[in-house]
């Protein structure tokens, strides 16, 4: 066993020990604080449930209605002008909405084309360089009661478009 493997296996127990020793030094009831945090986590999860349910219903409606397929078909000529594969468009549309749905699309693209194909590589880089903007805004802003999120939405979606653009440029540059 290498020294790095030993250090990495001991890191988490050492971190927990340091936290407990610091709590002991500060005379804080660590177990009580831990259980209070757990109670707050459960309350937060229950308050987030309606927002999560709304997002899941909206995503399933988009998928089941055939909107994504129609949109993909309509934009295929524009994508071909920029030499972009139309198979990436559904991932690019779903990624700002749902991380799990976009991860499923990434797995499907990788299974269809193989891990060495341009589409699979670009999809993986898009997945890693963008965020689930609408999900984050809906769940976290909704949980704390923020109603005006227009600017955050604009900036978040602009960052997603920039991330997707750079992901494709990097894929072309690095893997071509």
Image: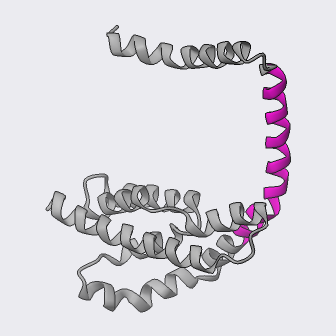
Q: Quadrant of the N terminus?
A: top left
Give residue 130's quadrant in the image: bottom left
**Residue 65 in magenta?**
no
Report the span colored magenta: 31-57
- Going by the image, does 61 lie left or right of 78? right
Q: Nearer the viewer, residue 142 or 110?
A: 142
**Residue 168, x across and y down, in percent:** 28, 68
Give residue 174's quadrant in the image: bottom left
Residue sticking out furthest to the front: 26
Q: Nearer the viewer, residue 16 or 73?
A: 16
Q: Residue at x 44, y 83 (%)?
A: 72
Q: Residue at x 79, y 42 (%)?
A: 41
Q: Residue at x 43, y 92 (%)?
A: 74
**Residue 7, x across and y down, in percent:** 41, 14
**Residue 46 in magenta?**
yes
**Residue 105, x across and y down, in percent:** 48, 62
- Going by the image, does 103 lie left or right of 138? left
């Amino acid at each position: 066993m290498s020294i790095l493997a030993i250090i990495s296996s001991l890191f988490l127990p050492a971190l927990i020990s340091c936290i407990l020793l610091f709590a002991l030094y500060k005379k804080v009831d660590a177990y009580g604080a831990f259980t209070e945090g757990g109670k707050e986590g459960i309350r937060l999860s229950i308050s987030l449930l309606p927002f999560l349910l709304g997002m899941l219903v909206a995503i399933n409606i988009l998928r089941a209605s055939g909107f994504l397929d129609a949109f993909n078909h309509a934009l295929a000529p524009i994508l071909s002008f920029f030499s972009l594969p139309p198979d990436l468009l559904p991932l690019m549309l779903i990624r700002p909405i749902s991380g799990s749905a976009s991860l499923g699309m990434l797995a499907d693209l990788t299974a269809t084309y193989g891990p060495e194909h341009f589409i699979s590589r670009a999809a993986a880089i898009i997945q890693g360089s963008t965020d689930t903007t609408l999900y984050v805004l809906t769940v976290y802003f909704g949980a704390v009661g923020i109603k005006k999120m227009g600017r955050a939405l604009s900036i978040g979606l602009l960052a997603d478009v920039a991330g997707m653009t750079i992901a494709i440029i990097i894929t072309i540059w690095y893997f071509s």
